[in-house]
Image: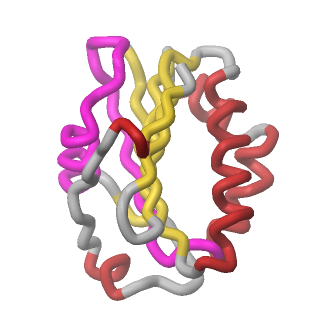
Amino acid sequence: MSFVSITRLRVRSWKYFPVFLFQALRSARQGAGSDGNQSTRLLRDRHNTFWTQSVWSSEEAMKAFMLAGTHRSVMHSLLDWCDEAAVVHWSQEQSGPPSWQESHLRLMQQGRVSKVNHPSPDQQAFSIPAPQPRPANEIRFR
């Protein structure tokens, strides 16, 4: 049994893009090196949108990562950097990562918005377009 965590974040202004990207890469590296991590992937989508996908041995392992190091320190900044944020978690039998299409479907069916200080109309309506993954826009850390 594995625990999957999906996030979708949209950077609201180009002025936040460099620091967001730097911190996203640092957080992903932290996650990939954390105890219990089975897979970590990032996807750069259209319109300054980023998806993260991580698979863990347990929910506890994911929470330990989430509340430590770079990830913990950057979470508060996302309130201002992003105008859209959403998350979904689930347990699955297989240890491999789900497809981006399944990630989107789960987000729409079981996910929730995360707090942002400047929500877009799409954030308020929970309107999330399906990602358009391309190999050149995906980074697999593990």
Residue at 21% over, 56% down: 130
Q: Is residue 65 above or below residue 9?
A: above
Q: Quadrant of the N terminus?
A: top left
Residue drawn 62% across and 24% down?
32
Whether residue 44 sits left or right of residue 81 in the image: it is left
Q: Quadrant of residue 62?
A: top right
- Quarter of the figure with residue 127: bottom left
* Magenta span includes 27: no
Q: Which of the pair 52/3 is nearer the observer?
A: 52
Tell me, yes or no, whether the highlighted magenta stretch contains residue 100. yes
Q: Kindly identify the residue that appears in the image at 79 percent across and 53 percent down.
A: 73
Q: Residue at x 26, y 80 (%)?
A: 125
Which one is in front, 67 or 122?
122
Q: Which residues are magenta?
A: 81-110
Horizontally, is 86 left or right of 74 in the view? left
Residue 42, image x, y percentages: 48, 41
Residue at far front of view: 136
Give residue 118's quadrant in the image: bottom right
The picture places residue 30, in percent across and down from the top left corner, at 71, 31
| Residue 117 percent across, percent down from the top left | 59, 82
Instruction: Report the side of 2 relative to 31 (left or right).
Output: left
